[in-house]
Every structure is written in C-alpha cells, then in structure tokens.
Image: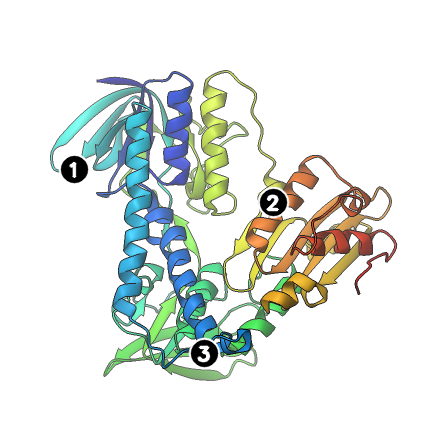
Amino acid sequence: MKYDVTIIGSGPGGYVAAIRCAQLGFKTAIIEKYNTLGGTCLNVGCIPSKALLDSSEHYHNAVKNFKAHGIDVGELSVNLKQMIERKNGVVKITCDGIDFLMKKNKIDVFKGMGSFINKNLIKISGETEQQIETDKVIIASGSKPSTLPGLVIDKKRIITSTEALNMTEIPKSIVIIGAGVIGLELGSVYARLGSKVTVIEYTATIIPTMDGTLGKELQRSLRKLGFEFFMSHKVKSASVANDEVTIIADNEKGEEVRFTGDYCLVSVGRKPFTEGLALENAGVKLDERGRIATDEHLETNIKGIYAIGDVIKGAMLAHKAEEEGVFVAETMAGQKPHINYNLIPGVVYTWPEVAGVGATEEELKKAGKKYKVGSFPMRALGRARASMDIDGLVKILADEETDEVLGVHMMGPRVADLIAEAVVAMEFKASAEDISRMSHAHPTYAEAVKEAALAATGNRAIHV
C-alpha cells in the first residue's frame, strides 16, 4: 500500500501531525511500536503524572488544610493501589481517544517498530513483518530517559519516571537525582503521601532552565513540603544492598558524600530515541548531540523526510511537538505556517505550579538588554488568600525603552493555565502597559498579571 505521508511515532507530535495531514487531504499512515497510541506523554509521562499529582494533592489538602476550612475528617490513609488504578484509567481513556481520532480521520494505524529500508520504503516489525511505500515521512519517535555514568537502572530500586508512576508501596524515603521538572513533580507526589524526599542536583539551582526567581521561590515552597536539597553535587555511583540504595556524590568542595533511600529516581533529562529506525538506510544525518538534524522547515538532509518533537533540537515539550507536527503538515501542503519558539511556555506541575515564557532575566542580562521588572506576590491577592494558595508571584520583564513584554514568569495556583495570557500578549507584541490597562475579573488569580504589569510601568501596582 502507498501513502502520501507516514508518521513514525504516535506521541503528541506524531498523532497531531497525522490528524493535520489527513485534514489537508493526504493519505496518511502512523506507526507505533507499542500496543497503545499516545507515546511517552499519554502513557508514561504528562497524563499519568498529572493524575497522580492531582490525587496526592487531594490527600495533602485533606490532611493539612481541611481543618482550616472548617472540614473535620477522621483518620486518613492512602490507598496507593486505587490511586494507581485511577491513573491507569485516565491513561486508558486518553489513549482510547487517540484511537478514535485516527479512525475519525481515516488514518491507517500500524503497530510495530518502523524503520527505513530506503527513503520511500518503511518496514514495520511487529507480530508480522510488513512494508509500506510512502512519498513523505515524519519522524516523531520521541525520547527516552537519560542516565549517568556509574548508574545502572535496575527498574526495581534504581528507577526512572516510568517505574515511579507504578509504585506498589509508598517509599519511606526516595532520593531523586536531578532537580528538573520530572523529578520535582514526582517528588511532590510522594512527599505529599509521606515520603522523605532528598534531591541531588549538579547545578546550583533547581529548574535551572527557567528564570532564577522561580527556582528560588519553588525551592522555598518545596522545603515546606519536606524536600531536602543538595545543590552543586556530582553523583558518581548508585548501588543496591538489602533493599536500600546508596548514592555516592562529590559536593562542591570535592568531598565525597553518601545518601541512602528506599528508592533512587534518576531524573537527569531525556535523550532522543533513534535506535532501530535504520536512519542510515535513508541517509538521514544526526547532529553532534544525537538528534536528527533539520532545517528551518524541519526537513532533514533527505528531501521528503521531516522530524519533529523530542528527536530534534529544542525543548522536549509535548506542545512544542504538536506545533511542529502542524507546521510540517501545512508546509508539505504548500502553506506558510510559523512557529515562534521563544513563545512556547514551560510549566512545572508542582503545587504551586510554575510557568514561564519568553526571555529569563538571566538571558536578558547576558545579552546586555536594557529591561525593567515588575513583580507582584500571590499573597497580596484576595483570591489566593481565600484558597490558601499564597506562595509565589508573577514577574514581568519589559523592554526599558519600548515597554514591549520580553518575558513573563510566574509561580502560584493555576499558573499552568494563566501563562496562556502572557503567550497571547507576547504573540501580539503587547507592552506591559497594554496588559495593565486590560480589565481582569475580581477576585481571580489573573489579577496578579495585571498588577505585575502595573509594577513594570512605573511602580503603579495597586494592591501591594
């Protein structure tokens, strides 16, 4: 059978690309090596982690905050098995939804490992082996967890995020290597359920790719949850004996330090997944970091073969992959789409949530850009006090001369949703004054954005 477009990988980038290709009239096939569609995000990433984050937050609030709200409850306990089952149900419904969308859009689904025989012939190795012919290919094969030299992940005591989503017990203690998004989110789940959480980070700050103010604010908040942080530590090894993990690291002075825990979660980022694709058979080149090299149209060095998402350069974010999937489909159809990579937001789904878009203050300083800062604390909001969510702030960075918004960074309740206001404003090159003169409903968390904009335009914030 011959197709106009074949997508390898059914994560957010792949399945969105497939749908947009089908909408544009291309005869489309999608290949997925696992039994369910949805990739890492839907199966062992974004969706299941958010399900557990929500469940653990309900428990945490019942234990810590209900009494202040006038809600008296008896002795509480965690049914981890039910929590995991609910998470699995959320995943199943979400993945089944992708199956429905494939059928609705008349996209042919092939289960098995897709690999190149040549640029137009794809082999699918599953229960049976088959081949399909295709005019164009979109590689959306995603990423897998990275590890460190000296660490062997046994998936029992030394685990990745995949295993952390399916624990059969609440650890008394868990050591997390890496203070990035994934480690802090999963650490939050188990800290809320009663685990002692220790975080070891190589750099001097947590969430190091985000604005420095957010890292400081989040670290302060997580310490209240019981997190213990060891920054500027280089992990050398991890070993298991008698169901206990021992991690050896060097601190910033070069001194050897030992940590122990029931489990060790290795959360040091992810790397592109290209194994088994037989890219060499099509002549597709990788860059120096093992990513598939693409041009400004996301086309590889081989005409007609494109790549999107985690397998290419840029942030490893589901919504970035989705934008790229649509971009490639529309490019192939002769349209003129665009992606502004500067305006793809980043989010950490701890509680409070953390979100940012555009330039960080550190980036502006490094570039020698003249800017002004406006910030507003969440604790000054009536809505935040009403919900007892007073940690965090909104920070707006604006050009000193033109007042154009250059970056927005926030921590607080529902900022994962609130960051979209900043994306819209920056997409249309709004100034801080533009935002400050927009009416924001009262009482809402969004008022913090207006107040931060007022603060950036001459220290005019009203409620602080």
Q: Is residue 451 left or right of residue 17?
A: right
Which percent across, then down, holds residue 238? 34, 74
Instruction: Look at the picture and state if 350 lies above or below 396.
Output: below
How is the protein colored in the picture? rainbow
Asked whether, in this view, residue 392 is left or right of residue 194, the answer is right
Ranked by sequence position, the earlier of labels 3 and 2 is 3
Q: Position of residue 446 (x, y in %)?
A: 66, 52
Report how far apart the C-alphas of labels 2 and 1 lie in the structure.
41 Å
Viewer can see residue 230: no
Q: Does 239 appear above or below 52?
A: below
Q: Nearer the viewer, residue 370 or 345?
A: 345
Q: CA distance from mark 3 to mark 1?
A: 55 Å
Precedes in sequence: disc 2 or disc 1: 1
**Residue that badge 3 annotates:** 72
**Which residue lies under the disc numbered 1?**
126
Q: Residues within 10 Å of mark 2 (few under 14, many from 20)?
A: some
> For this rendering, which residue is in front, 164 or 280?
164
Q: Amino acid at mark 3?
A: Asp
Image location of residue 244, percent across then percent down: 29, 81
Helix, strand or loop under label 3: loop
Query: Which is in the foreground here, disc 3 or disc 1?
Result: 3
- Residue at x 25%, y 34% (from the top left corner): 114
- Location of mark 2 (residue): 420
Measured from the top left, where is residue 383 in percent x and y? 65, 61
Query: In the picture, residue 404 is in which quadrant?
Result: top right
Question: 320 or 104, which lies in front?
Answer: 104
Work out which quarter of the rendered image holds the N terminus and state it.
top left
Name the residue nearer the viewer: 18 or 210.
18
Left or right: 97 as drawn, with respect to 309: left
Taking the spot 57% from the left edge, 20% from the top edge, the residue there is: 336
The answer, for residue 18, to whether it is visible in the render is yes
Q: Earlier in the sequence, mark 3 or mark 1?
A: 3
